[in-house]
């Protein structure tokens, strides 16, 4: 019994996620993200102290200069001085009132150290705020005699208070790194995808285009070995075709001569019938060997009307005197395949049922042929069933039925073949990319089911 040739949708998605491309992509992405995180952390730690010193010095200098300018300027010139500070330096000075609505300073890693250094220079009573009376900025308090003032610097002048810029750059670099990881993963997996596709085509009976013998040494050797393997197997197929033609001619010619000599010999009727039976059995065995060894070429596949083929085959089988055929064939069942090979498969199944599936207590064999179509479009499946009403097969022996040259003990006394009937079926069905299931039928007998991709 065969496993499905295609995995269900859910398993295909799981397989996709566990593919080499995604593994490579996620590993490179994880490495890049980890490296970026470590890099940002290292830069933040290394630059923390210099940033604190730079910003603190800038704040102290601005406050000190403003304080000195206001202290030493003439009262009538202070308004002009304040206007110039606002216009040219972006510095504003406001009286500090008790009812000012003051919000705490920005919450970041630099602010505590900045406050510590600034207070050490300007005094412990220096206050900081991110917004006063609804106006956002970098606010610092200072004293002139007994009066308190707010000095507001534009926040753009105080760099490094937040990690937004670092986060932005890290995000950009991360996106670029992930795109690079996807590109690298694609390059790494391209030769494997080519090899996989070529292997799949070859398994379906197609001759794949030669793989490019270039690139890294490992890829070059793998592609070269695959190309050589394809050439060797094609040569084997060619030699086998010649051998099969020779066997068919060289063995069947003497059998035909023996048949003629038996007809002309002065023998008793019993002896003549026995020899004719032996010759017929030898010819049937040769035919089975040829059918088993004959390749099924995917290039010969056409749109086959399975419903019509099964109906014709059932009518032909119904002419046998010891067979009773029942049919339940859905119309409009189509599949890609070789019509001759598919018909040979159905005939082999009918013959197998006729020989080994006789209905208990009867001198004939009941065989049911069914065909159904399920699904839509790409998910359409054509199911063919051939079942008899015999005694069936012990469950532990079912798998042996598909092995070449194997017959069960119950069949040996009446066997006149080489044990290749179901092996031929299995081989042809595999070449068609279909599924073959063998099991005992409910109520007695053997049920053989073929599931093909429908059209």
Image: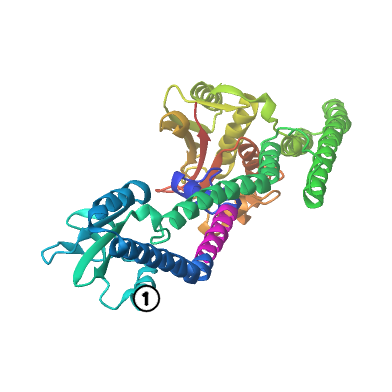
Query: Is the residue 7 above or below the residue 54 in the image?
Result: above
Q: Can you give x and y, in whole percent of width and height, for residue 190 in the image?
A: 67, 43
Local SS, label 1: helix
For this view, does 189 lie left or right of residue 157? right
Q: Can you give x and y, in whole percent of width and height, for residue 448 in the image?
A: 51, 42
Q: Residue at x 52, y 38 (%)?
A: 450
Which contiguous range is marked in magenta? 23-41
Q: Residue at x 59, y 37 (%)?
A: 433
Query: Is the residue 368 above or below the residue 10 in the image?
Result: above
Query: Is the residue 285 above or below the residue 185 in the image?
Result: above
For this view, does 225 lie left or right of residue 319? right
Most foreground residue, 301 or 115: 115
Most foreground residue, 152 or 392: 152
Q: Can you give x and y, in whole percent of width and height, for residue 375 in the image?
A: 40, 33
The kind of secondary structure the magenta stretch mainly shows is helix
Q: Is residue 36 magenta?
A: yes
**For mark 1, what is the residue?**
121
Q: Residue at x 48, y 41 (%)?
A: 388
């Amino acid at each position: 019994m065969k496993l499905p040739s295609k995995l269900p949708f859910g398993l295909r998605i799981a397989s996709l996620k566990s593919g080499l491309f995604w593994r490579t992509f996620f590993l490179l992405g994880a490495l890049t993200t980890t490296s970026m995180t470590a890099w940002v952390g290292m830069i933040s730690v290394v630059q923390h102290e210099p940033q604190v010193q730079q910003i603190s010095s800038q704040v102290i200098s601005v406050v000190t200069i403003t304080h000195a300018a206001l202290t030493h300027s003439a009262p009538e010139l202070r308004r002009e001085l304040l206007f110039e500070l606002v216009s040219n330096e972006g510095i504003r000075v406001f009286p500090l009132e008790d009812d000012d609505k003051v919000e705490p300073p920005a919450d970041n890693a630099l602010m505590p150290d900045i406050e510590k250094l600034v207070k050490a220079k300007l005094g412990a009573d220096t206050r900081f705020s991110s917004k006063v009376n609804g106006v956002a900025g970098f606010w610092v308090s200072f004293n002139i005699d007994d009066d308190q003032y707010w000095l507001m610097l534009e926040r753009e002048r105080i760099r490094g208070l937040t990690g937004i810029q670092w986060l932005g750059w890290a995000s950009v670099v991360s996106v670029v790194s992930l795109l690079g990881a996807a590109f690298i993963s694609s390059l790494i997996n391209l030769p494997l995808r080519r090899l996989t596709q070529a292997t799949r085509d070859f398994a379906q009976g197609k001759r794949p285009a030669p793989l490019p013998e270039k690139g890294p040494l490992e890829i070059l050797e793998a592609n070269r070995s695959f190309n050589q393997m394809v050439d060797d197997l094609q040569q084997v197929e060619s030699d086998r075709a010649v051998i099969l033609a020779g066997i068919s001619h060289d063995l069947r010619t003497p059998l035909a001569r023996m048949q003629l000599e038996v007809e002309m010999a002065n023998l008793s009727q019993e002896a003549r019938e026995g020899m004719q039976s032996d010759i017929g059995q030898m010819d049937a065995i040769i035919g089975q060997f040829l059918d088993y060894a004959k390749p099924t070429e995917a290039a010969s596949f056409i749109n086959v009307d399975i419903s019509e083929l099964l109906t014709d085959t059932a009518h032909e089988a119904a002419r046998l005197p010891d067979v009773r055929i029942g049919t339940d064939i859905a119309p409009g069942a189509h599949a890609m395949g070789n019509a001759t090979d598919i018909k040979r498969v159905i005939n082999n199944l009918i013959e197998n049922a006729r020989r080994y599936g006789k209905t208990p207590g009867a001198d004939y064999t009941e065989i049911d042929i069914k065909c159904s179509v399920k699904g839509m479009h790409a998910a359409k499946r054509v199911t063919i069933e051939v079942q008899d009403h015999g005694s069936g097969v012990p469950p532990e022996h079912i798998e042996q039925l598909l092995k070449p040259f194997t017959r069960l003990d119950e069949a040996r006394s009446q066997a006149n073949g080489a044990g290749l009937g179901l092996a031929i079926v299995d081989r042809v069905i595999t070449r068609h990319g279909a599924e073959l299931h063998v099991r005992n039928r409910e109520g007695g007998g053997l049920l053989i089911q073929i599931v093909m991709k429908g059209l």
